[in-house]
Image (spheres, grey):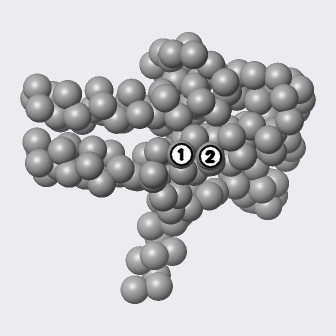
């Protein structure tokens, strides 16, 4: 059981690591917002934006520290991560997940939802906040559930950066 948990955490970290590329392949103006500010304050606002909706944060991951810790293993790669700080939160909405899996059992892949924040070495005064895009089955009920999840994630990001929708 412990091995399965470890493998699940490795898979999740790998998914998060590639999430920004997936997000940027879509519409970054919609999924990532950048603000000037202190990373820890903005990340705290991101956590509050989830909690303010009555949702529970299941896990907080630190991709920045993982990249620092594993730099030697990334042979041929720049050993210095591009981030000063990079973290993510995972959580889920029981209501929205029930709706999505009720539409199609394969929609379980949407959970957990992931929002993230990062501050790059190149732009130390800027904090980018966004979410991992979720793609559900193409049927109308799944697409309706997907739209609700995206609306939730966008609202969380907007609240964290103080943006009006």
Question: Dot 2 lies on which element?
Answer: helix
Check if mark 1's residue and mark 2's residue have beta carbons within 8 Å. yes
Q: Position of residue 115 (x, y in %)?
A: 55, 41
Q: Which residue is mark 1?
A: 52
Q: Residue at x 32, y 45 (%)?
A: 110
Examine the image and state in which quarter residue 143 appears. top left
* Cα distance between the residues tagged 1 and 2: 6 Å
Q: Is residue 73 above or below residue 45?
A: below
Q: Residue at x 45, y 67 (%)?
A: 8
Indicate left or right for 77 with 19 as reference: right
Any part of residue 75 in sight = no
Q: Position of residue 99 (x, y in %)?
A: 18, 44
Indicate left or right for 110 with 103 as reference: right
Question: Dot 1 lies on which element?
Answer: loop
Q: Which of 96/66 is in front?
A: 96
Q: Which residue is mark 2?
A: 48
């Amino acid at each position: 059981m412990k091995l399965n948990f470890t493998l699940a955490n490795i898979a999740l970290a790998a998914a998060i690591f590639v999430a920004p590329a997936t997000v940027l392949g879509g519409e970054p103006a919609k999924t990532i917002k950048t603000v000037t500010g202190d990373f820890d304050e903005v990340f705290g606002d991101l956590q509050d934006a989830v909690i303010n909706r009555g949702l529970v944060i299941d896990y907080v991951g630190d991709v920045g520290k993982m990249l620092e810790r594993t730099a030697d293993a990334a042979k041929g790669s720049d050993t210095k991560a591009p981030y000063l700080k990079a973290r993510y939160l995972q959580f889920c909405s029981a209501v929205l997940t029930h709706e999505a899996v009720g539409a199609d059992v394969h929609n379980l892949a949407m959970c957990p939802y992931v929002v993230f924040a990062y501050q790059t070495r190149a732009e130390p005064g800027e904090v980018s906040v966004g979410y991992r895009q979720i793609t559900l089955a193409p049927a109308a009920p799944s697409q309706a559930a997907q739209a609700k999840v995206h609306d939730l994630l966008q609202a969380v990001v907007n609240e964290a950066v103080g943006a009006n929708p």
